[in-house]
Amino acid sequence: MRPFFVLFLLVLVLLMIFSWQKYRRNQALKIVQNSSKKVTDEAFLHCIKQLKFSEYDGSKVINEIASEYIADVWGKGVLAFEYSIDAQKITTDQLPLIKEELTHLLNKYAKTQNLPSLNGHPVFCISDIWLFADVLHVDIAHVANQSTLGYLQDIKKLEE
């Protein structure tokens, strides 16, 4: 009976250790994600206000932009966020030009703010942009870790 009790205690202690390590890893990931979200939110808000395209005037965007993590689909550690803004005056054929201009503005912002880049990659990358029901949706990846870079490589493979 005694060996089973010792074995049970050993298994219980190991489970507690692994649970604690997982908890600490998840807490660290949340800190990184929240920090990246704040940086990306500030960059997007700053840049979308500068975007003037056709009849669209980004300077009228309110000061609060809601973003959502899209990392749950792609895995842990991916620093990518989706933004949705009212865009009644934008058409789908304008999306490639908007993506190009917004990417330029985001990375110009990153340079002026001295945001670190990962191995020479751009700090921000628009992984997807689409229009649905007069709402412009933009997915922006903050390339600050290897997981996010892997996510962008996966997206590129899907597009090919």
Image: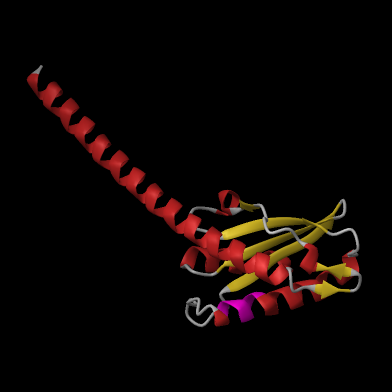
Residue 150 position (above or below residue 107): above
Q: Which residue ends up furthest to the top in the rendered image?
A: 1
Relative image position of residue 51 (x, y in whole percent): 77, 73
Residue in the foreground of this view, choosing between 57 and 68: 57
Relative image position of residue 100 (x, y in whole percent): 75, 77
The span picked out in magenta is 106-110
Q: Is residue 108 magenta?
A: yes
Residue 128 position (above or below residue 114): above
- Left or right? Give the position of 103 relative to 52: left
Residue 52, by quadrant, is bottom right
Quarter of the picture holding the C terminus: bottom right
Relative image position of residue 26 (x, y in whole percent): 40, 48
- Left or right? Give the position of 2 relative to 11: left
- Residue 157 visible, this angle: no
Residue 158, by quadrant, is bottom right
Q: Is residue 46 magenta?
A: no
- Left or right? Give the position of 103 relative to 122: right
Residue 136 position (above or below residue 3): below
The residue located at (10%, 16%) in the rendering is 1
The residue located at (72%, 61%) in the rendering is 138
Residue 92, by quadrant, is bottom right
The residue located at (90%, 73%) in the rendering is 54
Relative image position of residue 147 (x, y in whole percent): 49, 63
* Main secondary structure type of the part rendered in magenta: helix
